[in-house]
Image (cartoon, rainbow, N blue to C red):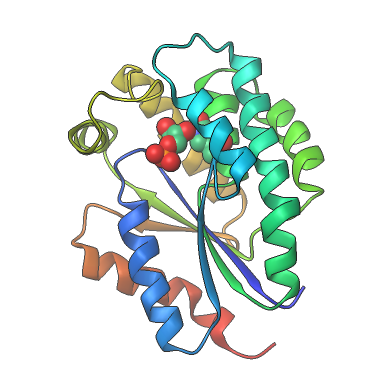
Amino acid sequence: MRGRLITIEGLDGAGKTTLALALRDELVDRGHDVRLLREPGGVPVAERIRGLVKDPGLQVAPRTEALLYAAARAQLVGEALRPLLEAGAWVLLDRFVDSSLAYQGAGRELGVEQVGAINEFATGGLRPDRTLLLTIDPSLGLLRARAREAPPDRLEQEPTAFFGVIAAAYAELAAAEPERVRVIDASEPPARVLDAALAELADLFRPT
Ligand code: TMP
């Protein structure tokens, strides 16, 4: 594949969307063909699943939740990610498999390995070229997320402790794959977060 897949991960309220928008502008300035996508979503089937899985009025069992995220991802990979990467685009993706490993594998206690296995099936093994992990204190992230979205969605209604578990799982994923997953302190102002992100992507800009 000729393009690049860059995923952005972190707790709700960490500032992923702000960073994604700023990075898109920077990459466009550098002459890349850039596409910004989000999970769950990005293509019509996945956007429908997003509505389901975020609905605070629904009870969704943990295994169902993991499968819904994986189903949305499978559609995004087949319909958008692979064709875009094959055409040489730089894809900035707000959340990917690591979200499921952290939220469903650790947060819902389904096990990172089991959730990894269904996602291997869903993605056909597609891996990001780089993952930017934005770290933030879980209670601060929740405050920001809840201020932005009222009423809070189904996941944002979970207690702060749930997000502490997810933050710890993300840290483990980063420690296990330091080459791919780069940790960025999201409590810094947006311009500093952008600079840090660009520094972590620098080697990808060089011709391979
Ligand atoms: P967001 O796009 O507003 O961040 O909402 C997505 C929510 O879904 C967020 O609470 C994180 C959660 N999520 C998972 O639990 N697992 C996943 O695989 C993905 C992509 C998101």
Res. 29 image quadrant: bottom left
Whether residue 24 is visible, yes or no, is yes
Query: Is the residue 58 above or below the residue 128 in the image?
Result: above
Give the x, y percent position of residue 81: 68, 59
Q: Quadrant of the C terminus?
A: bottom right
Whether residue 127 is visible, yes or no, is no
Res. 129 image quadrant: bottom right
Q: Residue furthest front?
A: 44
Between residue 72 and residue 99, name the one nearer to us.
72
Query: Is the residue 1 above or below the residue 117 in the image?
Result: below
Left or right: 55 with respect to 44? left
Between residue 184 and residue 81, name the one nearer to us.
81
Q: How many marks?
A: 0
Q: Quadrant of the N terminus?
A: bottom right
Left or right: 179 with respect to 94? right
Query: Is the residue 14 above or below the residue 28 in the image?
Result: above
Give the x, y percent position of residue 55: 43, 21
Between residue 204 and residue 66, name the one nearer to us.
66
Give the x, y percent position of residue 52: 52, 24
Query: Is the residue 152 above or below the residue 2 in the image?
Result: above
Give the x, y percent position of residue 101: 60, 34
Q: Name which residue lies at 23% across and 63% down.
A: 190
Q: Name which residue lies at 63% across and 71% down.
A: 4
Q: Name which residue lies at 53% across and 44% down.
A: 39
Q: Name which residue lies at 82% across and 48% down.
A: 124
Left or right: 143 with respect to 207? left
